[in-house]
Image (spheres, helix red, strand yellow):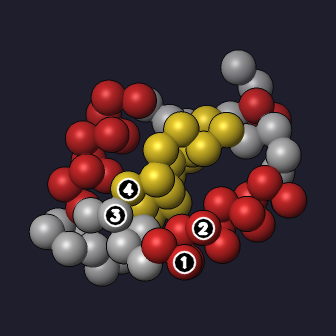
Amino acid sequence: MTCMNATALIAEDEPLLAAHLKAELARLWPALSVVATVGHGEAAVQQSLALRPQVLFLDIRMPGLS
């Protein structure tokens, strides 16, 4: 898999911000596949380890684990 066809995870506890980021990424990097969007820190860790995305977009203040 090349960088042009990368996978990503979005960790954002504000659903509207997560949706906006996902939409902007689709517009700017159409080949990027967002494999998960999570809303709290523990899920970000679990899904990152399980799915192994190449790119992580992380909110710095998340419920449960920042």
Residue 30 position, x and y percent, is 84, 46
- Quick check: marks 3 and 1 in contact, CB under 8 Å? no
- Quick check: marks 2 and 4 in contact, CB under 8 Å? no
| Separation of marks 2 and 4 at Cα, in angstroms | 11 Å
Q: Residue at coordinates 20% horizontally, 74% vertically from top-left? A: 63
Of callouts 1 and 4, the N-terminal one: 1
Q: Which disc is residue 19 wearing?
A: 2
Secondary structure beneath dot 2 equals helix
Disc tally is 4
Q: Looking at the image, is 44 positioned above or below residue 62?
A: above
| Separation of marks 1 and 4 at Cα, in angstroms | 12 Å
**Mark 4 residue type:** Val
Q: Residue furthest left?
A: 64
Secondary structure beneath dot 4 equals strand
Q: In the image, is 66 to the left or to the right of 18?
A: left
Of callouts 2 and 3, the N-terminal one: 2
- Quick check: marks 2 and 1 in contact, CB under 8 Å? yes
Secondary structure beneath dot 3 equals loop
Which residue was labeled with disc 4? 38
Secondary structure beneath dot 1 equals helix
Which residue was labeled with disc 1? 16
Which residue was labeled with disc 3? 39
